[in-house]
């Protein structure tokens, strides 16, 4: 257990699996009280299991059901957290999904579902978080910053992705959402940054790692030659939420084993 986030309340969206679960565990280990958000009753057992692991390890937290693409549900989740814990200090906008299709076959439903969760969900949660930071004002006893928002973006805010135009568009847009908020609220000591993961071993990209052949093919994209783990992202999220990163805002931080140095060019292009 460390104390970097001691006394702070962190909402992590989409935290019943994958990266969100990893971030929740890392933040709880750093002393935060974590809110493990999950979208629907079917993911409640997984959210409960993440909470149990955190509590068994001596951490603190709660679960909160809310579909981040629904305005009323997001408002209710924030109200519930403020009622239970007094405020929110950290938001990790992590919930996300893919609905892949060739672009000429992509349905409006596939487009809207991805934009609704990955982008509008981040808008709705960030807006509630900033409203709460402004209402509450500084809390110097726990952090230099009045509030911190971490947006889970992707290497695909930089790398185009054929067959995933809706997903890549949502992540490209998160970059501008994040930077606009950093610009608009920097003078209120609200820090907003993005984490841009490469390939992290989670349910969202199972086909890319579940067979040795798929994993070998993935490794041709990753100079560091291993797939990332949720803990890798958790470590960075704790740093970005802590005062150790107090001069970082408006930044996209890539954490990808070197994927964005374009390994395909290693032999001269
Ligand atoms: P995941 O599928 O395990 O996690 C996504 C989570 O979002 C799930 O827990 C899911 O229940 C939740 N979710 C989906 N719709 C929701 C909604 N409407 N409301 C609330 N929660 C909802 O996959 P992951 O890899 O852990 O993905 C987490 C984030 O990381 C996503 O934003 C994803 O785009 C991003 N990301 C992942 C990778 C990777 O390689 N795994 C790479 C780059 C970015």
Image (cartoon, rainbow, N blue to C red):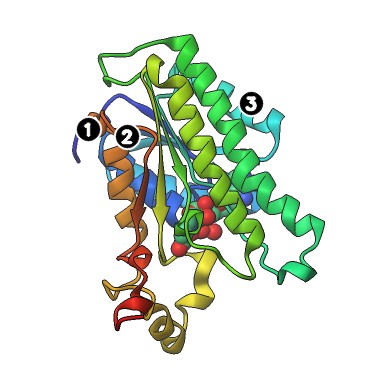
Q: Is residue 65 shown above or below 230?
A: above
Closest to the observer: 262 or 174?
262
Q: Marks 1 and 2, Cα distance to the nearest angstrom?
A: 9 Å
**The C terminus - image quarter:** bottom left
- Look at mark 1 in the image and give the residue it sits on: 4
Q: Marks 3 and 2, Cα distance to the nearest angstrom?
A: 24 Å
Give the mark toward the camera: 1 or 2. 2
Q: Residues within 10 Å of mark 2 (few under 14, many from 20)?
A: many
User: In the image, is 2 to the left or to the right of 28?
Assistant: left
Residue 68 locus on image (x, y percent):
63, 39
Question: Is residue 123 in view?
Answer: yes
Q: Sequence-wise, which precedes: disc 3 or disc 1?
A: 1
Q: Helix or strand or loop: what does disc 1 sit on?
A: loop
Give the mark toward the camera: 3 or 2. 2
The reply to whether the C-beta atoms of the residues labelled 1 and 2 are less than 8 Å apart is: yes
- Look at mark 2 in the image and give the residue it sits on: 241
Residue 132 locus on image (x, y percent):
50, 17
- Look at mark 3 in the image and give the residue it sits on: 76
The reply to whether the C-beta atoms of the residues labelled 3 and 1 are less than 8 Å apart is: no
Whether disc 3's CB lies below 8 Å from ligand 1 is answered no
Q: Sequence-wise, which precedes: disc 1 or disc 2?
A: 1
Q: Residues within 10 Å of mark 3 (few under 14, many from 20)?
A: some
Q: Sequence-wise, which precedes: disc 3 or disc 2?
A: 3
Closest to the observer: 102 or 48?
102
């Amino acid at each position: 257990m460390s104390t970097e986030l001691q006394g702070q309340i962190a909402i992590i969206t989409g935290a019943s699996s994958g990266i969100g679960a990893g971030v929740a565990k890392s933040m709880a280990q750093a002393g935060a009280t974590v809110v493990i958000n999950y979208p629907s009753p079917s993911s409640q057992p997984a959210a409960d299991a993440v909470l149990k692991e955190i509590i068994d390890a001596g951490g603190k937290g709660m679960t909160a059901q809310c579909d981040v693409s629904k305005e009323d549900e997001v408002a209710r989740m924030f109200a519930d957290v403020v009622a239970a814990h007094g405020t929110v200090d950290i938001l990790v906008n992590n919930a996300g999904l893919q609905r892949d299709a060739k672009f000429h076959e992509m349905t409006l439903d596939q487009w809207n579902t991805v934009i609704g969760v990955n982008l509008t969900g981040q808008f709705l949660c960030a807006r509630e978080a900033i409203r709460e930071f402004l209402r509450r004002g500084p809390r110097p006893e726990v952090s230099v910053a009045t509030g911190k928002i971490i947006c889970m973006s992707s290497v695909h805010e930089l790398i185009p992705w054929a067959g995933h135009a809706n997903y890549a568009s949502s992540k490209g847009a998160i970059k501008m959402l994040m930077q606009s908020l950093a610009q608009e609220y920097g003078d209120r000591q609200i820090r907003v940054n993005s984490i841009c993961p490469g390939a992290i071993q989670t349910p969202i990209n199972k086909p890319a790692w579940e067979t040795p052949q798929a994993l070998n093919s993935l490794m041709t994209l990753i100079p560091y030659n291993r797939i990332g783990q949720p803990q890798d992202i958790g470590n960075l999220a704790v740093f970005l939420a802590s005062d150790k990163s107090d001069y970082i805002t408006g930044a996209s931080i890539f954490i990808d084993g070197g994927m964005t140095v374009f390994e395909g060019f290693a032999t001269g292009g």
